[in-house]
Image (cartoon, rainbow, N blue to C red):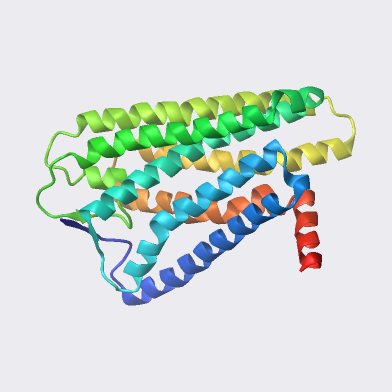
Amino acid sequence: TEFILLGFSSSPALQLCLFGLFSVLYSATLMGNTLVFVLICLDHRLHSPMYFFLCHLSILDICLASNNVPLLLRNLLGQGRTISFAGCGTQTHLYLIFALTECVLLAMMSYDRYVAICYPLRYALIMSWRVCLTLAAVSWAFGFIFGTLQASLALHLPFCGLYEVDHFFCEILGVLRLACADTTANKVLIFAICVCFLLCPLALILFSYLHILANILRIRSAAGWHKTFSTCGSHLTMVGLFYGNAIFMYMGPGSSNSSGREKVLSLFYSLISPSLNPLIYSLRNKQVKEALLKLQRRR
């Protein structure tokens, strides 16, 4: 009827330090992404395809962090490490939906930047609002369908013995280790989904940025170089970290210390990436800064 989450450490002093660190990162995630969402909604100058996708990214980051971190903070305070079977299944399901959706959304964002830089005169025609809504809907639909499929197959397995998940939340790999049945089909499905949601989007992103780089080389002005690199450089950095960690975690070779590696890598999706995305993607942009100043003057 319930699982036990082992978390990071049993040392009270270390748990208190981790609680303080994770609380700061979680607060930064909520405030930063909420601020980006509010600014994009209120300022009509930010009603463009790029900020439309950033708005969805902010929603995903808030949902992904809120799905995992509150339970982690409760466990670090010593308020109990148990989670019901239904709660564990819900957490696994939502985690897969949000993570897979973000994989597809990042590829859509790179396509948007590719069109904006390589076809600036046709950008408004190609990236119409109908196209943007379709791309966003496809991202959420793919995440929901394949996340539900993967979670359903995992949670219908029989579980026996110790119900101790060696993780700080009900991560899919940690849950599968507790099954007392053959999990080969689940692992094959995980690998297939990784190919579709990690390798294929990453290939599309690299293809887009190769064309962007070729287009940048034709720019003669230093201002044009700076503007293009500032727009795409940070995006490419976070994309590399996001997909690189995911590929290493779900497609890398297993080891005896794989659970410890998975905990550290999962922190990137749950805390580090959601807390950095508002700063890297949005809050450094000139238009977003102007919208923030405008909102402060209005208040």
Residue at the extreme left: 161
Q: x%, y% of residue 86?
A: 24, 52
Name the residue: 10% across, 48% down.
160
Q: x%, y% of residue 91?
A: 33, 51
Name the residue: 30% across, 51% down.
170
- Residue 164 or residue 256, whichever sits in front: 164
**What count of labels does the image hold?**
0
Residue at the extreme bottom: 13
Name the residue: 80% across, 60% down.
294
Q: x%, y% of residue 146?
A: 37, 32
Q: Compared to 93, does 193 lie above or below?
A: above
Name the residue: 79% across, 61% down.
293
* Image quarter of the C terminus: bottom right
- Residue 45 seen in this snapshot: yes
Q: x%, y% of residue 260?
A: 33, 53
73 on left or right of 79: right
Picture quadrant of residue 204: top right
- Residue 208 or residue 104, whichever sits in front: 104
* Image quarter of the N terminus: bottom left
Picture quadrant of residue 34: bottom right
- Residue 118 seen in this snapshot: no
Picture quadrant of residue 224: top right
117 on left or right of 63: right
Q: Compared to 132, does 285 lie above or below?
A: below
99 on left or right of 282: left
175 on left or right of 92: left
